[in-house]
Image (spheres, coloured by chain):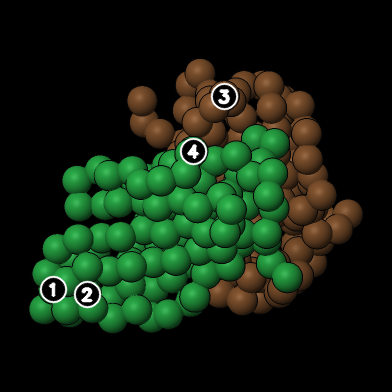
Chain colours: A brown, B green
Amino acid sequence: DAGVIQSPRHEVTEMGQEVTLRCKPISGHNSLFWYRQTMMRGLELLIYFNNNVPIDDSGMPEDRFSAKMPNASFSTLKIQPSEPRDSAVYFCASSLAGKDEKLFFGSGTQLSVL
Amino acid sequence: QKEVEQNSGPLSVPEGAIASLNCTYSDRGSQSFFWYRQYSGKSPELIMSIYSNGDKEDGRFTAQLNKASQYVSLLIRDSQPSDSATYLCAVRRSYIPTFGRGTSLIVHP
């Protein structure tokens, strides 16, 4: 398996623009997580899906953020409108729900909002 | 108070020494505990998991868990320069892992 695939690797945009981040989890995994990492706050959970259903979105900062998982092999995280404080590395991770819950991370998307 | 606490470091050790990384957590209902390694500019990767009190060894790595004290540690024996990275402690309850901010480890030759 190719692992968790994220795109794009880098995104530079201007304040107010819409940003869409994409993720393909590992085939067979039924849990998907979106995390955001900054120097100040570390790795923060944004949203957790299980079997394509959002289970916990308490980490989504505000209404500007939305996430979808239309099927088991694809998820998106959208920011509209983007702001400079959204600049961070966004990671998608997947796992197989059960006792272990070991996360496998994608390469991340480095987002810069100017 | 953050749920998972780690000293940000950096922790600097000479090559060949034992590096000791520590983590405390606040949720007594936590069920699983993980150590991830993150090289600069890369994504976290799992190196150890531990679920019950005591020690768990895997090669040069030993994870230690004390649920009564809400304390998890990672020992790296015979540290190598290639071990230089940020080590993230993660604690899971109800299927959602919560991460500490990580400890930066520097192994100097």
Are the residues tagged 3 and 2 within 8 Å (C-beta)? no
The image quarter in which residue A69 lies: top right
- Are dots 1 and 4 on a single chain? yes
Q: Nearer the viewer, residue B79 or B68?
A: B68
Whether tag 2 and tag 1 are in contact, CB under 8 A, the answer is yes
Q: CA distance from mark 4 to mark 2?
A: 28 Å
Q: Which residue is mark 2?
A: B107
Residue A56, given in percent of the width and then of the height, sits at: 78, 40
How far, Cα to Cα, is label 2 from label 1?
6 Å
* Amino acid bearing label 2: Val
Q: Are marks 3 and 1 in contact (CB under 8 Å)?
A: no
Res. A22 visible in picture: no
Three-letter amino acid code at disc 4? Tyr
User: Where is mark 1, residue-wise?
Assistant: B15
For label 2, count other residues whose C-alpha is less than 10 Å away and answer few (under 14), some (14-19) or many (20+): many
Q: Chain of mark 4?
A: B
